[in-house]
Image (cartoon, coloured by chain):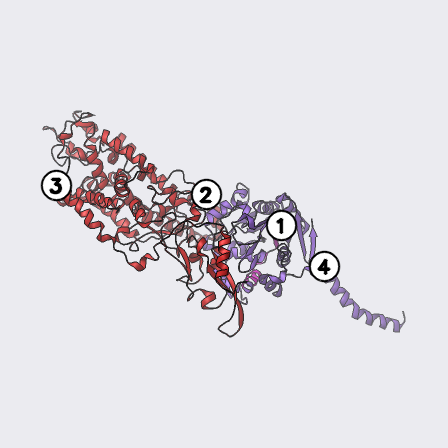
Amino acid sequence: MTTARISQLLFLFLFLVLFVQTEYRGVDEIDAAVNAFFRADPLVLVSYLLATKSWTWLLLPALLLVVATLLLGRFFCGWICPLGTILDLVTTSISKNRPIAALKGNLKYWLLLPILSASMINLNLSGLLDPIAILLRALTFMLYPLIGWAAREGWVGLYHLIGERRDIITPAYKLLHGHLLPFRETIYPLAFLSAMVLLIIIVLERYEERNWCRNLCPLGTLLGWLGRFSLFSRLPKGLCGDCGKCRDLCPTGFDQDVLAREDCILCMECQLRCPHQRITFRPFVSIRDSGPLLPERRVLLGGLAAGLLLAVPSRFRLPEKQSRLLRPPSVRNEDAFLEKCVRCGECMKVCLTSALYPAAYQAGLEGIYTPVIISRLGYCEYNCTLCGQVCPTGAISALPVDAKRREVIGKAVIDKNHCLPFAKKIDCIVCEEHCPIPNKAIRSRVVELIDPDGRRRRIMEPYVVDDICNGCGICEYVCPLEAKAGIEVFAVKNREPIIDAIDGMAEKVRFEAGSGYQ
Amino acid sequence: MDRRSFLKAASAASILIPVIVKDVLAAKELPLVSVAEGTDYKAITKKAINAVGGMGRFVKAGDVVVVKPNMGWDRSTEFAANTHPLVVRAVVEECLAAGAKKVKVFDRTCNDARRCYVNSGIEGTLKGMKGVECKHIEQERFKKVVLNGKFLKEWELYDEALLADVYINVPVAKHHGLSKLTLGLKNIMGVMGGNRGYIHRSIDVALADINAHLKSQLTVIDATRILTAHGPQGGNIADVKILHKVIASTDIVAADAVATTLFGLKPSDIPVTVAAYRRGLGEMNLERIKLVRV
């Protein structure tokens, strides 16, 4: 096994370990999460810089990788990238047809350049085609829940089979469930699409080894471009007249007789397997070796223009969807959020109650895969700060717990046509019971009324104290009505943090609202 | 004794004896509630249990015991939203000392189960104890049970609670928006499956229905600190009152009734208590409860 392959396997293992670690496992802080891969992702860095026009120390590792690529070349793809490793592992068992001509040439620039130019006008699409994001989404939305589901079904099936005797192996299952399996098996929208994208990338291996990497991947294209300035070169630069075995050995760079420097992923296969021991990688500056520095002007301008043309029309959103577009806590401004979010899906993976889901249509085309809270399916746990901790770009801020508790997601609104005390004149207030705000953002007043049977009754009617409601959504989540809840969280523009313990203010609200209080 | 005096005596006795016997029986039946006070919570818990006959009265060697605390909320101990871990620990230790084969501790939580188990301190305090199990609720273990109650005809209950030899109810005493207080009778909701919020529309009758089916052999109420407002999860330390008390009784209604007085309320103020009393699940009249302070 080559050194590069060992490194690949180690990083793939690291990726999977961090992926599994990106979950609440009994402590409030997650020390290491899979976000490390995005923080070291130059495509994420470049699109972040272009979109926000500002710097963040969160992405320092990515800057270091840029520097390393400038010095060494496109080694990331051959040594680190977990998607590349998976392709290397499966490609040997996929028989090859002829390469697809349509993928050759400038297609990769037609993918990379629009991403960059769209970023410039604040639409950060890098995550859609970033290889690590593609892999992570397929894992998060499809494979991991599927594995969890299968394990759970097996475990439950065992109970139906042998009942209490299952307890004997409970410790083993608890260990597995506590450390490896997802806590709950969430079903995500876009799961199928996410898996399909990964599947297509694997199917592309039928035509050519590392087909995605050499012809499409925008991260690889970016790294390849940076790698042209590398201080290392392979010698000889091309195929030897008497051998030419390199063409077969090389996974990415020998479409022509001369090695395309921007495509060389430094896997060193050629050096190791050269029958004549002729090949060396050594410091040798030669930018002129490989084609022009920039793609031809037609592609450059067209690619950039495509991004601009893409960004504006994709902004269309259905207004009625916006009223329920709830973002993770600490997201106060939609535009600023879209500039930073890489749609990696980590916040959704880590979300304690499975409140976060990838937007399929709610946020328009521009918002696809960005996280939205669906309060009826899960709520924002009051004392949890995990999504902010794992967000690689700070699109969701990493806040201390007392600050996060005050962040406003939306405001709860009671629907009197459904809410039981109003609609059916019966007691309920499950929402008040669950409201986590210490002074209760949902309260109730006792009203005397005549119920539908003509009897005089005293009923507790809930009401929301807007000033201290943070929109966590537990009220909507626990509302005992079937399907539609009697209380729902709606998005608000002003997401200034609530001031907790504003009892004085709340008292004022109580008296202003009129009579009927106890 | 001549015939006349015998008849006199006999007739007098026939009138008096049933009264006397009834009185004697009633006196015997006066439910016992112990209230232990002190700052060593494990010690007062054990004292309270001993004052109602000791754990050996309920737990026999080889028994499987369920200890059901309230750990429904992601709140740390001082907020009085969950049963104090030391109280739980003491009850569990007493069960083991009485020869229990296995002690199971669980609750169907309201917040995320992992966070509740950890932050209540209960999972931590039981860690490493032999014969003690502190597992999350598993959905498949809920069994549909025919209750034939006044409000609930049937409901899903947790089979580990149903199958246990002894069921010990260990609630924390706290305020509740709808039922005014949540004590032993309401703590039973932690073994209910399904859409529990449904029972809020008639919570007093529904809880009597469930408690009539699943009897708590022993109720130990944690009043080391009580939550006086913004219950059942609180979150404001100003709402917590420290009392250093633990209450124990075999009569769940009586235990609840005594705990009610800690809040300055009367048992008759709490509809859940009243409904259970009317159902014959226990005694709520304080003058008919024998209170032992230890």
Mark 4 crowd level (few <14, some 14–19, many ≥20, 10 Å Cα): few
Do the residues under discs 4 and 3 have CB atoms within 8 angstroms? no
Residue A127 x/y as whole percent: 27, 45
For mark 3, what is the residue?
A297
Q: Residue at x 44, y 64 (%)?
A: A419
Separation of residues labelled 2 and 4 (CA atoms): 49 Å
Rendering colour (chain A): red
CA separation in Å, label 3 and label 1: 88 Å
Quadrant assignment, res B287: bottom right
Q: Is residue B218 magenta?
A: yes
Residue B283 in percent (x, y) is at 65, 61
Q: Nearer the viewer, mark 4 or mark 3?
A: 3
**Residue B89 in view, yes or no:** yes
Dot 2 corresponds to which residue?
A26
Residue occupying the point 79% across, 68% down: B16
| Disc with the residue nearer the chain's start (2 vs 3) | 2
Label 2 amino acid? Gly
Give the vertical position of A122 relative to B182 (above or below). Answer: above
Residue range of the region highlighted in magenta in the rendering: B206-220
Query: Which callout, 1 or 4, points to the residue nearer the camera?
Result: 4
The secondary structure type at the circle numbered 2 is loop
Q: Which residue is mark 4?
A: B28
